[in-house]
Image (cartoon, rainbow, N blue to C red):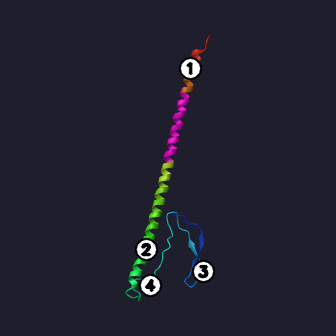
């Protein structure tokens, strides 16, 4: 279950120039809140035949903007997962390297003690 944080206030600018505040619940970590531009006229709402091309350009631009936002979010998520996996691999490598290094130091110390014992004159 997703954990939701407390409500936050967001300023919204109306077409009349007024600014109002609305409460918005903060979404979970994986969810994003996209602001979508609205075309109030639509493709056929009493517009002339020349308006359709303008509408189509606006729609394509909006779809492209949303597509770019989704790609950016996906790339950021993949990069975050890669960084986590990379840091895990690095820490595991350093841990094993340290363990092997300690083992070599112990062997070297043990070998040097044996040489001292043999080399002691009587």
Q: Decide which of tag 3 and tag 1 comes sooner along the chain.
A: 3
Q: Decide which of tag 4 and tag 1 comes sooner along the chain.
A: 4
Q: Which residue is mark 3?
A: 19
Q: Decide which of tag 3 and tag 4 comes sooner along the chain.
A: 3
In what element is the residue under mark 1?
A: helix
What quarter of the picture does the C terminus occupy?
Answer: top right
Instruction: Nearest to the eye among marks 4 and 1: give it.
Output: 4
Q: Which residue is mark 1?
A: 114
Residue at point 55%, 66% (across, down): 4
Q: Is residue 60 left or right of residue 11?
A: left
Report the span colored magenta: 88-107
Q: Which residue is mark 2?
A: 61
Q: Which residue is mark 4?
A: 41
x, y percent for residue 47? 41, 88
Q: CA–CA distance between discs 4 and 1?
A: 92 Å
Q: CA–CA distance between discs 3 and 1?
A: 84 Å
Q: Decide which of tag 2 and tag 3 comes sooner along the chain.
A: 3
* 2 and 1 marks in contact (CB < 8 Å): no
Q: CA–CA distance between discs 4 and 2?
A: 16 Å
In what element is the residue under mark 2?
A: helix
Residue at point 43%, 77% (across, down): 58
x, y percent for residue 59? 42, 77
């Amino acid at each position: 279950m997703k954990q939701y944080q407390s409500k936050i206030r967001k300023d919204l600018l109306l077409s009349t120039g007024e600014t109002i505040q609305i409460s918005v619940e903060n979404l979970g970590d994986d969810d994003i809140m996209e602001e979508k531009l609205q075309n109030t006229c639509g493709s056929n709402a009493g517009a002339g035949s020349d308006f359709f091309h303008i509408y189509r350009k606006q729609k394509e631009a909006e779809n492209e903007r949303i597509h770019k936002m989704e790609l950016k979010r996906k790339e950021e998520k993949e990069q975050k997962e890669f960084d986590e996996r990379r840091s895990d691999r690095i820490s595991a490598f350093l841990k094993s390297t340290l363990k092997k290094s300690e083992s070599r130091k112990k062997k070297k110390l043990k070998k040097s003690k044996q040489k001292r014992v043999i080399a002691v004159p009587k």
